[in-house]
Image (cartoon, helix red, strand yellow):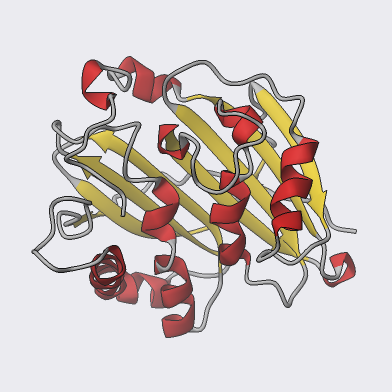
């Protein structure tokens, strides 16, 4: 059986992107998060269309989110919200799958997006390293429980920003983007909230750098194998990612 693969973070001149419309608490009255994400996905699709056509397989996507200084970095705007449903939309529009997705957030004036040719790299390692296997449907509680039970011995990462990479090995009938949020929500012991916590109640906003990778192997069947690599996000912490403005604020929400 093939093993999970990690792809290298690209070095490329990404295109400027306006994220104001998608930021929670900064949209026009009456719009929902779903509406804002749809508008955001449409903007990205127009920006990268020519690059997707010109870039050889396998495809990767890089998304750098710049947040205003008054928006908490670690308690809002979970990174998986930005790339789903963006990546499925791009895949359907261009009829080409993405095997690597990198998304980060920082306090910065600008955001950017780019398409690249994904290149395998060595295992990045990390403070926390696990490989888990699931056998259940992603919509079942068993899927979450199986992951949570296999990382139950994780030592919670220290407070502050987290860099996380997830490498998925899936069968050809799995839509791997459907696995992202559920997997992250199941990493309570690793991210620092109680192992018994279910759903999205944990501090997933602490993830400031996220790498998602995928390999398809027919031999894996309906199972999913995931390599998990997590560490403190040193770059974000160096830039002040744990300052007082990251305390929860009633003015900014992710719903």
Hey, which residue is sitting farthest left in the picture? 28
Q: Which one is nearer the viewer's eye here, 55 or 78?
A: 78
Residue at 78% in and 70% down: 171
Residue at 31% in and 56% down: 113
Quadrant the C terminus occupies: bottom left
Is residue 64 rendered to the left or right of residue 168? Answer: left
Residue at 15% in and 31% down: 69
Residue 78 percent coordinates (x, y): 39, 45
Asked if residue 120 can be seen in this view, the reply is no
Q: Which one is nearer the viewer's eye here, 14 or 188?
A: 188
Is residue 240 rendered to the left or right of residue 126? Answer: left
Query: Where on the picture, by quarter, is residue 166?
Result: top right
Residue 32 percent coordinates (x, y): 24, 66
Instruction: Give the answer, above or below, for where 61 lies relative to 90.
Output: above
Is residue 221 rendered to the left or right of residue 47? Answer: right
Q: Which one is nearer the viewer's eye here, 84 or 3?
A: 84
Quadrant the N terminus occupies: bottom right
Residue at 57% in and 45% down: 184
């Amino acid at each position: 059986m093939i093993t999970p693969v990690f792809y290298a973070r690209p070095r490329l001149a990404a295109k400027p992107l306006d994220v104001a419309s998608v930021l929670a608490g900064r949209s026009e009255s009456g719009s929902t998060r779903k509406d804002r994400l749809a508008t955001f996905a449409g903007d990205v699709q127009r920006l990268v269309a020519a690059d997707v056509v010109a870039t050889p397989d396998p495809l990767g996507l890089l998304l750098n989110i710049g947040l205003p200084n008054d928006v908490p970095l670690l308690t809002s705007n979970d990174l998986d919200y930005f790339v789903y449903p963006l990546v499925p939309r791009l895949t359907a529009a261009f009829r080409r799958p993405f095997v690597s997705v990198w998304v980060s957030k920082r306090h910065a004036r600008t955001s950017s997006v780019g398409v690249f040719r994904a290149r395998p790299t060595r295992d990045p390692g990390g403070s926390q390293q696990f490989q888990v296997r699931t056998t259940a449907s992603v919509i079942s509680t068993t899927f979450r429980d199986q992951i949570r039970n296999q990382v139950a011995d994780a030592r919670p990462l220290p407070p502050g920003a987290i860099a996380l990479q997830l490498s998925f090995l899936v069968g050809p009938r799995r839509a791997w983007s459907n696995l992202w949020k559920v997997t992250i929500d199941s990493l309570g012991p690793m991210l620092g909230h109680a192992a018994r916590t279910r759903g999205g109640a944990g501090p997933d906003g602490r993830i400031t750098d996220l790498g998602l990778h995928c390999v398809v192997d027919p031999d894996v069947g309906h199972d999913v194998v995931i390599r998990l690599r997590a560490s403190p996000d040193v770059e974000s912490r160096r830039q002040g990612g744990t300052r007082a403005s990251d305390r929860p604020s009633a003015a900014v929400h992710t719903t």
